[in-house]
Image: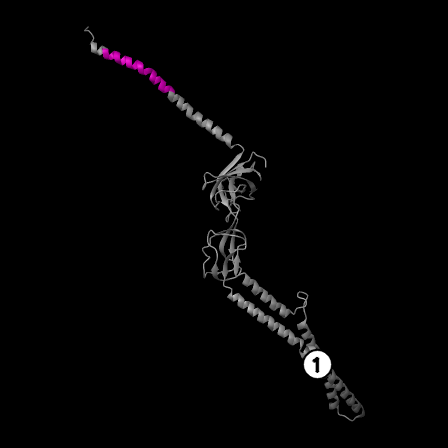
Amino acid sequence: MADADPQMETELAEQADAQARHQPERKGGKRRRLVIMLAVPLALLIGGGIYWQSQIGKASTDNAYVQQDKVSVSSQVGGEIVEVFVKDGDEVASGDLLFKIDPEPFKLQIAQADAAIATAQANVTALANSKDLSGVDISAAREDIAFALATLERQQSLWDRGFTTKADYEAAQHAVEQAREQMRQAQAKQTAARAKLATGAAVPGINPQVAAAKAQRATAELNLRRTEVRAPMAGRIAQADRLQLGQQVVPGLPVVTLVESGSSYVEANFKETDLAHMNVGQRARIQFDAYPELELEGHVASIGAGTGSEFSVLPAQNATGNWVKVTQRVPVRIAIDEKSPRPLIAGISAEVTVYTSEKK
């Protein structure tokens, strides 16, 4: 057998040395991979446990929004807007003038009411001085009755002695009846005149016609005052786009919205499964999407009397056979206990955490 090639033997020896050197490195890499594969699930398990522990005694939701008390301001009388004193974003105090409606039609109503009062007063004076009320017709009727009776007595005496005709005798009787009827008519006219001047229990001492005219004037004055529309409370002006000069205002139709100052609260919609340990008065933490660095303290002010779907325009009908159970949301009002350094705008999103493990 021929001798082995020295160069080949050298190469084989070098390969054997290299394999010997890399064998421990491969074993170490496998161990590292094994450690990593075990560490990741373990870390997730530990993190999940910590998160679960941190959520015990709390109920959180990001389905929450800042709410503020709002009043839709409308006019109680109709007409054209002639003056505007505010615009969007203005802060106003209670009683501040917002806008003014043309007062001229209502001033004319007051003038008409004044004329009606004068007419009623003139009618009362005329009735008080009328002959129906004075009794002149009654006195004349009494004299006519007395004369007719005297004439009838003479005719009766002549008729008994046969010195008068039946026609004259009956004419004397008819004259007495006519005089008495005139007396009754005069008395009825006097009663009617007194009734027109009488006052009722509702407005004692004032003639009803005069009272009605005065009430008409009071209504016109009230409508004139209502042409100046004022703020019912302190707040900030919003939705003032319809508040324009020349705009025709319809009574009762909102013209501008007033957001009450300092009335901010949060309406948080919690899952029904979060309400088991939630009570009024429990502490709450509020965070806002608009201000990530802002965190305010609050408390549970009230828990809604029904779910959101229950008070919707079209409540869910679950009587059908294809009903699927869905976790409902219940509105919970969160009062804000701190004054916010940033403006709380109605409608902005918030995240609320209620500490249900704390006693109220």
Decide which of 88, 156 is in the foreground and name it. Answer: 88
Classify residue 101 as left or right of residue 16: right
Q: Position of residue 242 (x, y in %)?
A: 46, 57
Furthest-right residue in view? 161
**Residue drawn at the location 64% of the way across and 73% of the way down:** 124
Q: Position of residue 111 (x, y in %)?
A: 55, 69
Work out which quarter of the rendered image holds the C terminus and state it. Answer: top right
**Residue drawn at the location 50% of the way across and 31% of the way down:** 54
Disc 1 marks which residue?
136
Q: Which residues are magenta?
A: 10-31
Q: Is residue 40 magenta?
A: no
Furthest-bottom residue in view? 163
Q: Position of residue 343 (x, y in %)?
A: 48, 45
**Residue drawn at the location 59% of the way across and 71% of the way down:** 116
Q: Position of residue 234 (x, y in %)?
A: 53, 51
Q: Is residue 24 magenta?
A: yes
Compared with 245, 64 (above or below) is: above
Q: Quadrant of residue 121?
A: bottom right
Asked whether residue 138 is in view, the answer is: yes
Asked whether residue 328 is in view, the answer is: no
Most common secondary structure along the magenta stretch: helix
Furthest-left residue in view? 2
Q: Amino acid at mark 1?
A: Val
